[in-house]
Image (spheres, rainbow, N blue to C red):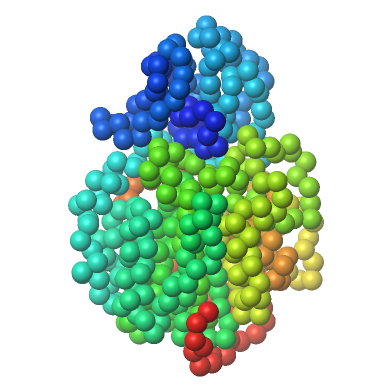
């Protein structure tokens, strides 16, 4: 189960902690310290009176009676002042809220955590695998020591920038949008001069480290194939890679102790912030992890990406949105259960089977058959551009997985990207004709 623990008051973010018990915590006058490692690098400072507090760990789904029972137990520890985190938010214990259906119901399925923090293990891994840039060589990018660890945002951009520097005629960097904190969201265009392209993104949800590592591994692998004269998706289309959409949130998962943060730092789920013609029947408010924001495109991350995509309306022929975890190939729609019509339902079934044939144990289904979603990227871009759009939930049962799984998951996504290029051509019913490279983006 995905659960949450107290980390801060008045903060829109929280650390979702996988826990099964009620853990006592004592509050000093000026600070709360979370038990992490001896270094205590993720301590948070709060202004609070000196009283004992309880951190209550809530499962994603809980009954009203269960909540009342927990609240009653917490009353012995001055309930009026106690705090807990439910649905990714710090809240008073006297508030009760129900969790809407959403990604977390999938992500919690058969989830097993052996520890609550994989940050320190990966920081240690990074120290042991630090000198990878000088050894980068065309044709061997996917075997670099870079892929031995999950990496910080600075290291990811350092690696992808190095790939661009070594392949200036193939790979170029561009800015696609800004974040809530005014950071730049970068993408990389791999071009062999085609008139049409495909778009791949990951990290709408900050905690999904495997998503970004798989996309970067795929980019490295495709460059390897080009250097080794092997066929790739780049033979048919130019390829846009946006490895980290939720730049602010991803950075927070590394630096502030909020390892399982889902949303952006403004408290909005970036995969619920896209337009939909259907209203969510659930009462999804700011306390919910799937909070869509006050209105579509309220967040600069999504608004900027949408503006950029519209400039490529005639160019981009297909979209892949990479998430973790679950081993799923999800296609429209998630906000209603009616057939799309016009032959699109059959086309998506063919596309899904094609991806499964390349990726292995991945199940292709329309999203609504699994759980309802409203305002997702996949639904929106299909409606807006009438091009195939698919969300891939990378195989696995947890967000914090061993770094040793990076090559395996990356290989699956790499195979999926290459197969997606073939399926898009069939889906759209046309061939791709290369043209001379154009300058810029």
Q: Is residue 40 left or right of residue 19?
A: left
Above-or-below relation of 169 to 288: below
**Image position, residue 20 (x, y; %):** 46, 24
Looking at the rendered structure, the number of numbered marks drawn on it comes to: 0
- Residue 5 % position (x, y): 47, 28
Choose between 117 and 417: the one closer to the eye: 117
87 or 20: nearer the viewer: 87
Quadrant for residue 35, please give it: top left
Residue located farthest toward the bottom when viewing the structure as drawn = 436
**Residue 387 visible in the shown view:** yes
Q: Would you say 154 lies left or right of 345 here?
A: left
Front-most of residues 118 and 256? 256
Identified at 78% across, 47% down, the residue is 279
Q: Is residue 362 visible?
A: no
Residue pictured at 49% horizontal, 62% vertical: 185
The quadrant holding residue 385 is bottom right
Q: Quadrant of residue 225?
A: bottom left
Residue at left 27%, top 72%? 140
Q: Nearer the viewer, residue 186 or 377?
A: 186
Outermost residue toward the top in this view: 76
Q: Residue at x 47, y 82 (%)?
A: 191
Q: Position of residue 302 (x, y in %)?
A: 61, 58
Reply above or below: 124 against 221.
above
């Amino acid at each position: 189960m995905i659960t949450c623990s107290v980390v801060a008051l008045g903060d829109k973010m929280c650390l979702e902690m996988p826990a099964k018990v009620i853990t006592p915590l004592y509050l000093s006058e000026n600070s709360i310290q979370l038990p992490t490692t001896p270094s205590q690098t993720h301590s948070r400072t709060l202004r609070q009176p000196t009283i004992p507090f309880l951190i209550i760990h809530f499962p994603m789904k809980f009954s009203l009676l269960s909540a009342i029972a927990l609240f009653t137990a917490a009353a012995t520890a001055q309930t009026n002042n106690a705090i807990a985190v439910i649905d990714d938010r710090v809240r008073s214990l006297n508030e009760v809220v129900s969790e809407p259906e959403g990604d977390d119901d999938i992500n919690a399925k058969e989830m097993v955590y052996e520890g609550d923090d994989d940050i320190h293990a990966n920081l240690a891994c990074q120290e042991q695998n630090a000198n990878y840039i000088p050894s980068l060589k065309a044709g061997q990018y996917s075997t670099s020591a870079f892929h031995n660890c999950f990496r910080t945002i600075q290291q990811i951009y350092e690696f992808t920038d190095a790939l661009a520097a070594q392949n200036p005629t193939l790979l170029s960097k561009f800015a696609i949008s800004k974040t809530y904190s005014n950071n730049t969201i970068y993408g990389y265009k791999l071009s062999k001069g085609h008139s049409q392209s495909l778009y791949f993104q990951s990290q709408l949800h900050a905690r999904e480290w495997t998503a970004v590592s798989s996309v970067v591994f795929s980019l490295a692998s495709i460059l390897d194939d080009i250097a080794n004269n092997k066929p790739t998706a780049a033979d048919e289309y130019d390829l846009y890679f946006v490895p980290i959409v939720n730049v602010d949130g991803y950075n927070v998962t590394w630096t502030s102790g909020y390892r399982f943060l889902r949303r952006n730092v403004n408290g909005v789920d970036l995969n619920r912030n896209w337009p939909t013609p259907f209203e969510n029947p659930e009462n999804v408010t700011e306390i919910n992890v799937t909070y869509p924001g006050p209105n579509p495109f309220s967040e600069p991350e999504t608004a900027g990406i949408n503006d950029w995509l519209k400039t490529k309306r005639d160019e981009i022929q297909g979209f892949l949105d990479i998430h973790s975890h679950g081993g799923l190939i999800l296609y429209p729609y998630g906000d209603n259960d009616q057939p799309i019509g016009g032959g699109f339902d059959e086309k998506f079934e063919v596309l899904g089977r094609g991806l499964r044939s390349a990726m292995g144990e991945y199940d292709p289904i329309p999203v609504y058959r699994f759980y309802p979603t409203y305002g997702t990227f996949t639904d929106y871009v299909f409606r807006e551009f009438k091009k195939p759009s698919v969300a891939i939930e990378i195989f696995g049962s947890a967000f914090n997985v061993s770094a040793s799984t990076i090559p395996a998951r990356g290989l699956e996504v790499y195979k999926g990207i290459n197969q997606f290029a073939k399926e898009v051509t069939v889906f759209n019913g046309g061939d791709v004709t290369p043209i001379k490279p154009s300058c810029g983006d």
